[in-house]
Image (cartoon, rainbow, N blue to C red):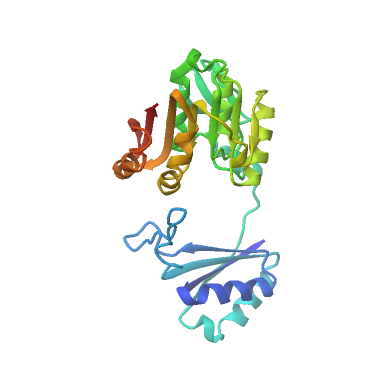
Amino acid sequence: MFELRLLCHESAVEPVSEALEALGALSVSVEDADAETPAEQALFGEPGMPAPREGWSRSRVTALFNEETAAREAARLLEPQDFFAGGELLGIAAVAEQDWVRLTQSQFAPVEITPSFWIVPSWHEPPRLARQVMRLDPGLAFGTGTHPTTRMCLRWIAAQGEALRARRVLDYGCGSGILAIGAALFDADPVDAVDIDPAAVQATRANALANGVRLSAGLPEAARGVYPVVLANILATPLKVLAPLLCAHVAPGGFLVLAGILSRQADELRAAYAAHLSIDVSDEEDGWVLMTGKR
């Protein structure tokens, strides 16, 4: 397999990518050519907010071809095109054969939540001191335990311990189902997990089965009534929009646990929830905060 690497201006990325696909590229990827330099540009905004801009000023476009001759022919045909004006051929190189499954697996090690509570991919043995183990492999839905927001939520769950036993829990925006499964491992029951993405619902059901826990996973309308614990690890903007809905699901004396919030956004969240519930920062890690409140 061979990769063709090109440097393109912002306006050329789309036509160049389409041309490469038409010329038989197996895949086309685009990266910020100025990544990890002072000129690096962020493109992704929060849900409901426009992206800062549509593309990078300079992009590195990489296309994979089965044969070197196909990669060279694609480069030859692209170079004289008007839409490639100002672009640059960075090179053509053979791609080393790799065991991609093993390489991917090597990037995911067991994750410590507490000294006795760990998230362990299926290809690893649990650490010797682990007493509570969640088996979770990376997949299409968000939530493997490596992100600070997920770890803080799971630490909160672990800190409740016996207090969760036989208590109804809602995981709103469940992704992989990691928080719902965490609650079920600490004997919460029943546990409802909901998400707007059907793929997340399927991932949650599969992950629950792999961990031998019982929960109900569905779309948001499946969340009904009030819960002693409501968990929502999303992002600040949707959390603000969802304030009335989430608070309506919190039972008297119940807890609301919110994550996906940057430290600088804590005041915005306090204000958004003030009319419904008083919330405050209860944990912080790597610039992210966990905010909790009790009705």
| Location of residue 66 in the rendering, given as x and y in whole percent from the top left corner | 70, 64
| Location of residue 280 in the rendering, given as x and y in whole percent from the top left corner | 32, 32
Location of residue 290 by image quarter: top left
Residue depicted at 32% across the width and 45% down the height:
268
**Residue 109 in view here:** no
Picture layout, residue 170 above or below residue 236: above
Residue depicted at 35% across the width and 43% down the height:
272
Query: Exactly how many numbered labels are in the figure?
Result: 0
Location of residue 106 by image quarter: top right
Residue depicted at 38% across the width and 36% down the height:
276
**Residue 2 in view here:** yes
| Location of residue 155 in the rendering, given as x and y in whole percent from the top left corner | 44, 25
| Location of residue 124 in the rendering, given as x and y in whole percent from the top left corner | 61, 28
Picture layout, residue 121 above or below residue 190: below
Between 288 and 102, the one lying in front of the other is 288
Q: In the rendered view of the protein, which quadrant contains the N terminus? A: bottom right
Between 41 and 156, the one lying in front of the other is 156
Q: In the rendered view of the protein, which quadrant contains the C terminus? A: top left
Between 293 and 290, the one lying in front of the other is 293
Residue depicted at 62% across the width and 37% down the height:
222
Q: Residue furthest top?
A: 162
